[in-house]
Image (tube, grey):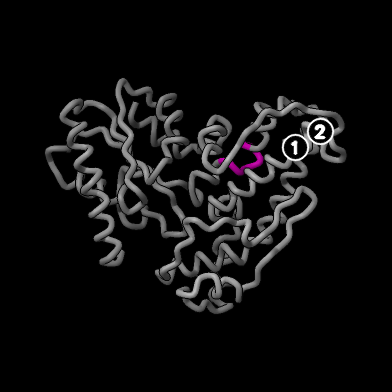
Amino acid sequence: MSVNTLRASRDKAVVVFTQFTRLYKLDPSALYCFFEGEDSKYYGIRIKNIIRPKKDFYLSCKGKEGVLGIHRMLSARKYYANIRAAYFIDRDFDKSISESGLNGIYETPCYSIENFYTSVKCFSEVLRTEFKLIESDENFERCVSLYIKLQEEFHNAVELLNIWIACQRDKSSELNISDISVSRFVNIELDKITIKYVSDDLYTMFPRSIVISQEELDSKLTELRCSYQKSFRGKFEIEFLLTFLQKLSDEANQGNYPYFTQKVKVVLSLSKRNIISDLSQCADTPDCLYSYLEAFR
């Protein structure tokens, strides 16, 4: 970890630590949960259902460095040796924290929590709860088949984008992609995915990026190839899901063939802002998260 990253980690952690100490004085026995940002929208319902704490507090740490920073601060103080604290971070394109020897932190087994929303299993649950379709329904099968087909096309389209970003991360490039929409790179329609970029466009869009060789790109592709749905950038993945569901809902309400054989009334008002919270009950809950949370019961 670079000096600047450590400094940023400490600065973010100090702010959260001040908030925490005030709360801890009120209730030392409560469960204290530390998140990168608004990830409690996903974890919250699972914490309530699995741990069922009498009292819990959620603290946003403004990023992974903030969570790791507060973990270091609390671990280093004997006064907080008996604290009930849960820490949650995304894996991202980084090396797993398991390699650093840090304990007591939950790290997603995929890129981020957004990837928990983009599996076929989660999509099928959305069809059941929001589209009111059942597995034996022909329209259910049509939707699942279309989702699998289009998601594969989408992954092929954003393959270069993801591995290029991952290589930039490996080289500690100053690459700010937090507000970048995947729609700048691909056009998502229900009948096809259209690619709107080539590698040169990435260097133009990010002038402070580092030149990546084809050999490095090929090596990174091999590393991430096991499961694009899990290893590709979560915000791009969930933007695909959001766009797909919005377009599919329109087709359902009109009963348009070949997507639907009849009208299916869908009242689904999703946006980038609310999709994490609104579809939280449908999202995957991996076994490793169950195990982590059950340890606090």
x, y percent for residue 32 = 28, 33
Instruction: State the image quarter where residue 269 is shown.
Output: top right
Identify whether 6 is placed above or below 132: below
Amino acid at dot 2: Gln
Residue depicted at 50% across the width and 64% down the height: 166
Residue depicted at 33% across the width and 34% down the height: 58
**Proximity of marks 1 and 2: CB atoms separated by less than 8 Å:** yes
- Give the distance between the C-alpha atoms of the residues marked 1 and 2, in whole angstroms: 6 Å
The residue segment tinted magenta is 117-122
Residue to which mark 1 is pinned = 250
x, y percent for residue 37 = 39, 44
Say left or right for 213 vs 106: right
Identify whether 227 is placed above or below 211: above
Residue to which mark 2 is pinned = 254
Instruction: State the image quarter where residue 294 is shown.
Output: top left
**Along the line of sight, the residue nearer the viewer: 167 or 199:** 199
What secondary structure is found at the residue carrying circle 2? Answer: helix
